[in-house]
Image (tube, rainbow, N blue to C red):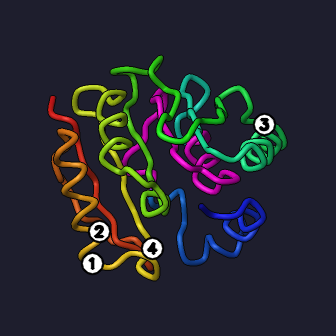
Amino acid sequence: MCPWWLGYLLACPLRRLVQNPERLLAPHLRPGMTVLDIGPGMGFFTLPAARLVGERGRVVAVDLQPRMITSLTRRAQHAGLADRVDARICAPGDLGVSDLAGQVDLALALAMLHEVPDPDRLLAEVGRVLKPAGRLVLAEPRGHVSDGDFETALDCARRAGLDLVDRPRVPLSHAAVLQRPA
């Protein structure tokens, strides 16, 4: 698990020079959407997603670490986005999002799946909360995840009923967009 204090480095504005969250997310988001951000840390992708979904949209951010969620909540308030961000502490093995079954337009699993002991279980839970034709953007850092391990993650997503629809270029990462059948 990523230590909480590393969250400050991951949320650093300089990271935008390499991975621009708006550029990565904009093709997948529209105003009014519901987004699930899994393992958001301190909100590097959460806050841009909240801006992109607009006033009628919502981003549910779930993390195991209370300090990450506390910082994310503070950053959302400071940015004027607190009304769009539902920050939740989840439990190991349970995202705590069963209330979202069939309601999520887009799920984000960015640089976190390699830290999960049971990716099949997590991706099955994601599959249950996605709407028909809902999508998952999955990205893993090349420095931590080999090509073969990323392919294994894609196999887990397929077992969860998600179909591969794209392999976008994300700097320093393996990436895929998967979709729940319509």
What residue occupies the far bottom of the structure in this picture?
143
Q: Amino acid at mark 4?
A: Pro
Confirm or deny contact between disc 1 and disc 2 (CB under 8 A): yes
Residue behind mark 2: 150
Which quarter of the rendering shows the N terminus? bottom right
Which mark is in front, 3 or 4? 4
Q: Is residue 97 magenta?
A: no
| Residue 141 image label | 4
Spatial separation of the CA atoms under disc 1 and disc 4:
10 Å
Mark 1–mark 3 distance (CA, rounded to whole Å): 39 Å
Residue placed under numbered mark 3 in the picture: 80
Which three-letter amino acid code belongs to the residue tagged 2?
Phe
Q: Please give the range of residues in magenta.
A: 25-51
Q: Say which residue appears at 47% left-offset and 39% top-offset.
A: 93
Measured as percent of width and height from the top left, residue 179 is found at 23, 42
Give residue 178's position: percent from left, percent from top: 25, 49
**Residue at the far top in the pictured view:** 99
Q: Residue at label 1? A: 147
